[in-house]
Image (cartoon, helix red, strand yellow):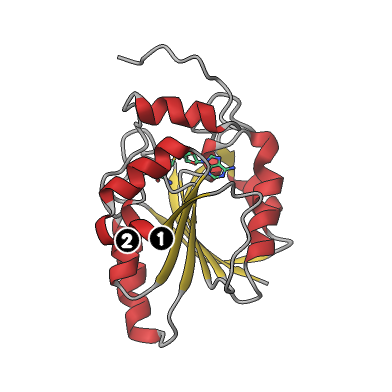
Amino acid sequence: MTPQFSSRDPNHPAFWDERFELGFTPWNRGAVPQALRDFVAQSKLTVEVVHNCLIPGCGHAYELGFLSEAGWQVTAIDFSSSAVATAKSQVGKWAGRVQQADFFEFITDSPLSLIYERAFFCALPPAMRSAVVKRWALLLPSGGKLLGFFLLDDTEAVSKKGPPFRTNLQDFKTLMQPYFVCLEDADVSDSLAVFEGKERWQVWQRL
Ligand SMILES: C[S@@+](CC[C@H](N)C(=O)[O-])C[C@H]1O[C@@H](n2cnc3c(N)ncnc32)[C@H](O)[C@@H]1O
């Protein structure tokens, strides 16, 4: 049963604090998605540099330990103190890599090569989309990659009900194309029910 929430605006940390505190996190995968595992396996074969990766809106941060164990430098950020506490309590020795920070204000100490996206873009209301894309573009140098899972839909122009908020495929391309080129776009085989059939695995490269 869905609890009664007092906070209704996903732009504010209080919205997310309340949900983490009540244990109502239906987006939580509780495991590392297969497409990310495949990307890491592939990049071990082809890339010699250590990736410096940001995970914005990390929530439970299940991917943090996996990517860190793969030898990547990883920073997981979330603006909800309850999300940060939850993540720190479950990532063991990687807890120092979780920071409380607002994505729109976060500045990295060392240049990023990757940003990992899952259920962050779709967590924010449609009015925030352009700002998120511009921030991705600002944080990544030319050649850097944005990769992960995107909730896309070709049946409606804008999803007003959420989170999660689905984005029209063409609208998403229009937002991205001034800054990024799409290198990969694939179905997702292991989506949670809440995302099933609408989730795409994509890799975008910064122009
Ligand atoms: C739907 S959850 C997804 C969590 C995680 N990425 C996952 O896949 O389970 C969205 C997360 O984004 C965080 N968030 C929303 N706006 C944020 C912002 N401006 N800066 C940092 N984190 C934010 C929320 O606190 C919440 O933990």
Residue farthest to the front? 96
Residue depicted at x 36% and y 69%: 39
Q: Secondary structure at mark 2?
A: helix
Residue farthest to the top? 4
Residue depicted at x 63% and y 61%: 107
Question: As shown in the figure, which amino acid type bears the numbered disc 2?
Answer: Trp
Question: As shown in the figure, which amino acid type bears the numbered disc 1?
Answer: Arg
* 140 w.r.t. 90: above or below: below
**Which residue in the structure is indicated by mark 2?**
94
Q: Are marks 2 and 1 in contact (CB under 8 Å)?
A: yes
Measured as percent of width and height from the top left, residue 157 is found at 64, 34
Residue depicted at x 56% and y 30%: 10
Measured as percent of width and height from the top left, residue 90 is found at 26, 48
Please tell me the numbered disc located at residue 97: 1
Please tell me the numbered disc located at residue 110: none
Q: Is residue 168 left or right of residue 49?
A: right
C-alpha distance separating marks 2 and 1: 6 Å
